[in-house]
Amino acid sequence: MNAVAKPRPANDVVIDVEGLTKRFGDKTVVDGFALQVRRGQIYGFLGPNGSGKTTTIRMVCGLLTPDAGRGSCLGHDILTESAKIKREVGYMTQKFSLYEDLSIEENLDFIARMYDVRDRKRRVRETIARLGLESRRSQLAGTLSGGWKQRVALAACLLHDPQLLLLDEPTAGVDPGARRDFWDQIHRLAGEGMTVLVSTHYMDEAERCHALAYIAYGKLLTHGTIPEVVAEAGLATYEIESPDADSLFALTAEIEKSPGVEMAVPFGNRLHVSGTDAAKLKATMAEVARRPGLAVREVDSSLEDVFIHMMRMNQPKA
């Protein structure tokens, strides 16, 4: 029997933080971060390596105290009630952290003891069934493939019936089929009222989230639904296609210096060219279209186009 989420108001805010700042020595890892996440949302958290995503997640769930800022998580103050937050959050780290010389069932039973879960044996059985682990319940965790380890880690996060899941790049190194199965589970949980904050590098995963936040170099650059994020970027994009990959490679270096072009990114035998000055970019593309062997057309800017552009435009100056 699946756990049934307690009814909550539709506009209930689960995470509400502002001004979060964290420094390690002279380096500011997170700088003035602000975010709101509502109950039942799957909120994607994106950014390059070293951007401060993990640090921010750890501050939100009470594992790390911010140097500045304020906020609440699940109605608890992140500065003074971190112990209460930890009891109501399921946190899945990048690294598989269960005991590899214990079976799936033994691992889950141990985790249930740690959380002092009532009717522990029944809860472990239900969680094993819920995640489709019955056929492997006696298998040692260390012998599992990446996809199955991921499923066991998710099961461990759910044992104490948390209200919020924090998933830190949970599908890194997992094959596409296992990633899809994992996301199907996440959407089922959200449908039951679970709130999920997930960091990822995969654009197809980002597109499965209800809303997104993009952080780079410690700063929040944008947030909102996918249409809102794409519209806010104000990016015009053209696609140039050529059967000759070598000529397209040469064109990339040349076109990046042209008026209106802020970014040119190859995708196989296609080149995505973007910029925020639509008029200048259109004029440049009209010139390019006159060259033989090239097909040029305007396309909708993708989420990937937007994020690559943001990362390039916001790189710290040397």
Image (tube, grey):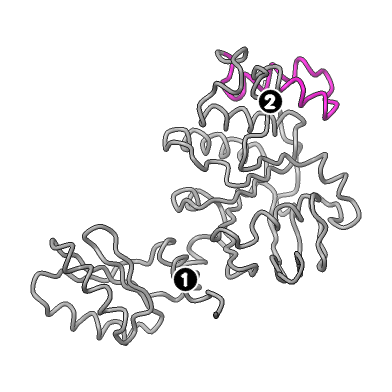
Residue 129 in the magenta stretch? The answer is yes
- Residue in the image at 57% along x and 29% along y: 149
Three-letter code for the amino acid on which mark 1 is drawn: Ala
Choose between 41 and 29: the one closer to the eye. 29
Q: Which residue is mark 2?
A: 99
Residue 97 placed where, x, y %?
A: 67, 34
Magenta portion: prevailing SS class: helix
Is 207 located above or below residue 253 in the figure?
Answer: above
User: Which label number is shown at residue 231?
Assistant: 1
Q: Residue at point 75% right, 37% down?
A: 162
| Label 2, residues with CA under 10 Å away: few <14, some 14-19, many ≥20 | some
x, y (%) of residue 199?
59, 51
Residue at the spot 28% in from the left edge and 71% down from the top edge? 238
**Tag 1, which secondary structure?**
helix
Name the residue type under label 2. Tyr
Left or right of 197? Residue 300 is left
Q: Residues within 10 Å of mark 1 (few under 14, many from 20)?
A: few
What separation in Å lies between label 1 and label 2 (alpha carbons)? 46 Å
- Residue most extreme to the right: 80
| Disc 2, SS | loop
